[in-house]
Image (tube, coloured by chain):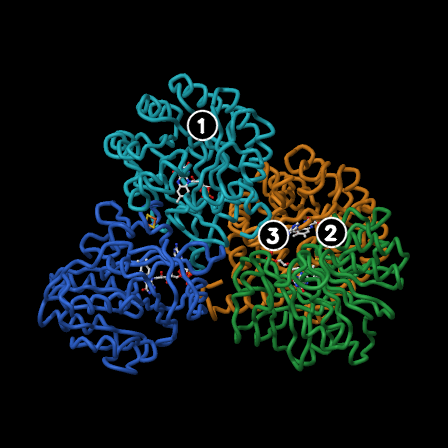
Chain colours: A cyan, B orange, C blue, D green
Amino acid sequence: MLASGTWGLGENLDNFFALKEIKENIGALVTKGVSVNPRKGNLPPRIFETPCGLINSIGIENPGIKEFKRNYLPRIKSYGVPVIVNLYGEEIEEFLELSQELRGEADGLELNISCPNVKKGGLFFSYDSKTVSKLVKEVREIWKDFLAVKLSPVGPVYEIAEICEKYGADAVVVANTYPALAVLEFKPLKILQGGLSGPAIKPLTLRLVYEISKKIRIPVIGCGGIVSGKDALEYLLCGAKAFQVGTANLIDPRVSIKIIKELRDLKNGLCCKSNSS
Amino acid sequence: MLASGTWGLGENLDNFFALKEIKENIGALVTKGVSVNPRKGNLPPRIFETPCGLINSIGIENPGIKEFKRNYLPRIKSYGVPVIVNLYGEEIEEFLELSQELRGEADGLELNISCPNVKKGGLFFSYDSKTVSKLVKEVREIWKDFLAVKLSPVGPVYEIAEICEKYGADAVVVANTYPALAVLEFKPLKILQGGLSGPAIKPLTLRLVYEISKKIRIPVIGCGGIVSGKDALEYLLCGAKAFQVGTANLIDPRVSIKIIKELRDLKNGLCCKSNSS
Amino acid sequence: MYEGKIVFNKKEAKNIYLLGIEIPKNILKKFQPGQFLKIKINQRMDPLIPRPFTIHAIEENIVYILYQIVGKGTKSLSKLRKGEVLEFLGPLGKPFPKLKNYIICAGGIGIAGFGFLLQKSANKRNFYPPETIFYGARTKEELARLSFLKRFGIPVKISTDDGSKGYRGFVTDMVEEELKQTPRTVLACGPKSMLKRVAEIGKKYKVKTYLVMETFLACGTGFCMGCVIPLKRGKYAHLCIDGPTFLAEEIALESLS
Amino acid sequence: MYEGKIVFNKKEAKNIYLLGIEIPKNILKKFQPGQFLKIKINQRMDPLIPRPFTIHAIEENIVYILYQIVGKGTKSLSKLRKGEVLEFLGPLGKPFPKLKNYIICAGGIGIAGFGFLLQKSANKRNFYPPETIFYGARTKEELARLSFLKRFGIPVKISTDDGSKGYRGFVTDMVEEELKQTPRTVLACGPKSMLKRVAEIGKKYKVKTYLVMETFLACGTGFCMGCVIPLKRGKYAHLCIDGPTFLAEEIALESLS
Ligand SMILES: Cc1cc2nc3c(=O)[nH]c(=O)nc-3n(C[C@H](O)[C@H](O)[C@H](O)COP(=O)(O)OP(=O)(O)OC[C@H]3O[C@@H](n4cnc5c(N)ncnc54)[C@H](O)[C@@H]3O)c2cc1C
Ligand SMILES: Cc1cc2nc3c(=O)[nH]c(=O)nc-3n(C[C@H](O)[C@H](O)[C@H](O)COP(=O)(O)OP(=O)(O)OC[C@H]3O[C@@H](n4cnc5c(N)ncnc54)[C@H](O)[C@@H]3O)c2cc1C
Ligand SMILES: Cc1cc2nc3c(=O)[nH]c(=O)nc-3n(C[C@H](O)[C@H](O)[C@H](O)COP(=O)(O)O)c2cc1C
Ligand SMILES: Cc1cc2nc3c(=O)[nH]c(=O)nc-3n(C[C@H](O)[C@H](O)[C@H](O)COP(=O)(O)O)c2cc1C
Ligand code: FES
Ligand code: FES
């Protein structure tokens, strides 16, 4: 799967892939976070590179659900793979409205309760197990198809994972980005607060996937720092049933083809002994 | 300061430094974790490199407090800089016994409530605010000199920081390593669970230091991924009053001299504009 | 990503290098002046993200990049040698607008993209040549590719901050002088402070002013939405797909400071 | 860390490279056979930790390292060129023990450290020469530095797994044959499976057996306690300060599998 926020809203995915390649290599497309109203996103700078990682603070820039359904979703569906819409809300009601809007329109939903880049709501959902219980339960009543919850890697993550299972989520995505900070300028001090992704965090999210997949029975979808087939295999071996690729798409738009090929080769035991990355 | 566990127990620090260099560049020496009884540490492998980071699972290998006082502490003190002993215990009683043993023997204590590499106790302290309250309070009664608590970067870290302040700690060290996992071999699956340190985590710990230093008034000592004077300056600008260098000592034993020089140069505004690292 | 072999990587001026990469002609054919490539600097993960560089010139099956060393990526790039292979993506971004009767204002490494424009306009390939090129740098040592630029028979007017060559002062002073006499469209690339000044001058003399902007890019492909440039009326443009060249009057001034 | 200029970095055998670094003589003077250097492979952060390599040989003011490409660090190392500067630390670890009447058993890249031992023993500098060198590799193509090794007038007996050169089979078969006839001290370096077999053979023929061990090192200076080798009776040794050469009888066997 291509992770949310790292391939836009599909406007130009086909500049980089043949349709056939998409079908053969990508299990599902998880859209950029979509909110009820359009969001302009945060002021620049929005991106900063850190050692082996990337901090982003996009702020869920998106056209809002109405415009998304009208002008983006049809195109994304035309790629011919399952479409999972990542939902972003600040209140439970917003998530419910979004789920309602998408009934019959998408193959699955991914509830983003973990975006570190928006002031209100977002991240705090993931600290508050009562709200998450209510959220999952109520969305589940509206949405009968595939429902995943995207967890934050910080906060009471094991507890939240169990709640998702209990209230009927079909899968949890482990995980979103890590709250991080970069200093852009010393004097006057200018900082960027955002979420850290990329290879730097792979050992951390891998650990979470390992622990969480021992605690719950619904599938865990691993997501964090995958840039190679070897990384993907590690997630699968540590308990993930599927995986998403995020930052790597920003480095090379066609990376998923490379990852799938490497993963197949590894699985075929062709190069099981090589750990070089 | 040199961070705990990254310069041994001082047996051969003077192979790499002239005494004068130690005094001029190192503010304090924080020892490897010391426990009541000797500990052999964990089975190998104990170390694994990840993208821009290092996972370690040493397991607090140390000779125990008695032997430490007899055969190691005198040498460490002879380097002529303040000595802070990092204490590791699985029960509050152990911390108390250690503090008692060290009365009058060291310049300060650093309570390690955050080691991710030992099965019992350790990390779980840092999830349990009641135990931490009791721990800090009781150690404070015994130990009148400088007392720092070394926090885990995971768990309810803001709450724990406030508790340390409330119960009389003189400073908090932010932070220890992050729980992480690496896959060593695919078949049969062989993994290493341990703590992640190094440049990969700098953006995460920097964020914690920034947030925590806004919440408490006692000094925050920054520790995570510092390898250059620029990194150190970032911590100071984000609210840290002092900083510790860990993994970098393993890359280059004399790195602290380089860091201090770079920091001085930066502070002198000589190269304030250069962000290259 | 494509692969290309380095055939040239040498110092051109103070802190400025010229890189030549051999590329299959069918890819080269698509390149337009004003577009850029995203170059993966080494095969390891630090630096992680490929860096964007304007296409500076094309000769046969070689694309040239003119780059300045500013940080870890460009420093590593300058260490690569002939024969090594680079991965890159491109062409990305929109070409320069097709202007007539215009002048160029370049500050420092901002000169990079105009080499290709001169080449294409000399060949009458959709682009018209500028009437004058105003090119400023801090010192004589930081001026790059002068003889190449002069090859096209278009006046190249130099300024240096310290007067070590050409006019002593800012390149924008020369541009203002020029526009005062003959108002004309301006196409400018350089540091933010220069672009800001060009925007002011353009406004004053009521000429169309195009600015080639810069920001940190992650994807360069429209995927991440990380590269926004604030426009007037609270809107954002995405540099990597809507730019890098923008009409000055559309840009919010704060993005130039 | 010291700095040294690369004067040589070329392929020697399949996947095996020879690296020469120019080093001030006052540092070189301290080097002993069996010790190692920790080399920072590039100035960026990936790979982060310097990698350990045995001192292979010394000539004038040049130290040679013989290395095999196995992962990201050694791959990057093989791309460095003459003239580039490397940072390194060393000498680290304990020298080989000073043995008399002994043979050497080397498997694959395990041969690396014995070049320096031959040099020093030829010069009668505290070390005695081995009586025979048994050197095995998988194929002929993976044998490195044969002519260098033969220069010292000591018999070098070759084995390859596929029989493409010398005895067909494991080097340990030859060693066992030798010990059966003349029991003697063995100094061995190679893959774990080979070391394990050497330990068994040494025990069987009741000869002193020294093994040069390997593990992932972080500091190499005794700082991190990351490099433990399990000894008998539940103790640990630290490879970087107590090793890398250990008496086989002291080592717990599980560390060899
Ligand atoms: C479309 C485009 C075309 C370009 N063409 C050229 C060209 O032809 N020639 C050329 O020399 N350069 C060109 N550049 C600039 C070039 O991409 C950068 O100089 C290069 O990426 C720097 O990489 P680095 O790793 O050397 O520097 P880095 O180490 O990444 O940083 C360089 C400087 O930028 C600052 N910085 C990095 N990210 C941010 C951020 N998010 N916010 C604020 N400051 C930040 C750093 O602090 C530092 O001061 C172009 C840029 C763009 C966007
Ligand atoms: C004292 C000493 C001397 C040495 N001398 C030489 C020499 O002269 N010549 C030579 O070629 N080599 C020598 N080596 C080995 C050499 O250091 C390694 O091959 C090198 O560090 C590999 O680096 P890399 O980045 O290429 O490989 P990496 O990418 O780091 O990994 C190589 C392989 O090792 C595995 N690995 C890495 N870390 C661990 C771990 N903690 N646990 C289990 N597996 C792990 C990886 O999975 C992979 O299969 C020596 C090692 C030591 C300890
Ligand atoms: C530029 C960028 C934008 C992102 N936007 C979203 C988003 O809108 N919704 C969301 O749930 N996650 C978002 N993410 C998080 C990713 O989907 C992914 O969970 C995270 O980056 C970790 O995976 P990675 O290391 O493979 O990138 C974004 C990540 C990046 C880098
Ligand atoms: C090999 C190793 C051993 C460590 N041992 C200890 C320890 O005994 N006690 C402790 O509190 N922290 C220990 N740490 C954590 C460091 O002191 C430091 O908090 C952490 O590594 C983050 O800083 P860094 O990124 O600069 O390394 C150890 C770290 C490493 C890498
Ligand atoms: S750089 Fe990613 S959208 Fe422009
Ligand atoms: S490698 Fe650190 S103690 Fe040996």
Hey, what amino acid is under mark 2?
Answer: Ser
Number of the label disc, if any, that sits on residue A148: 1
**In the displayed structure image, the side of residue D254 where residue B273 appears, left or right:** left
Quarter-of-image position of residue D199: bottom right
Q: Position of residue C198 (x, y in %)?
A: 21, 64
SS assignment at label 2: helix
In front of the other: label 2 or label 3?
A: 2
Q: Is mark 2 within 8 Å of ligand 2?
A: no
Q: Height in image: B111 above or below B3? A: above
Residue position for label 3: B49
Vertical placement of residue B203 versus D18, above or below: above
Q: Which numbered circle lies on residue B93?
A: none
Would the CB of label 3 be found within 8 Å of ligand 2?
yes
Which of labels 1 and 2 is toward the front? Answer: 2
**Which residue has dot 2 on it?**
D193
Dot 1 and dot 2 within a common chain:
no
Q: Is mark 1 within 8 Å of ligand 3?
A: no
Say which element carries label 3: strand
What amino acid is labelled 3 in the image?
A: Glu
* Mark 2 surroundings: few (<14), some (14-19) or many (≥20) residues within 10 A: few
The answer to whether residue A88 is seen in the rendering is no
Label 1–label 2 contact, CB within 8 A: no
Q: Residue at x 76, y 37 (%)?
A: B91
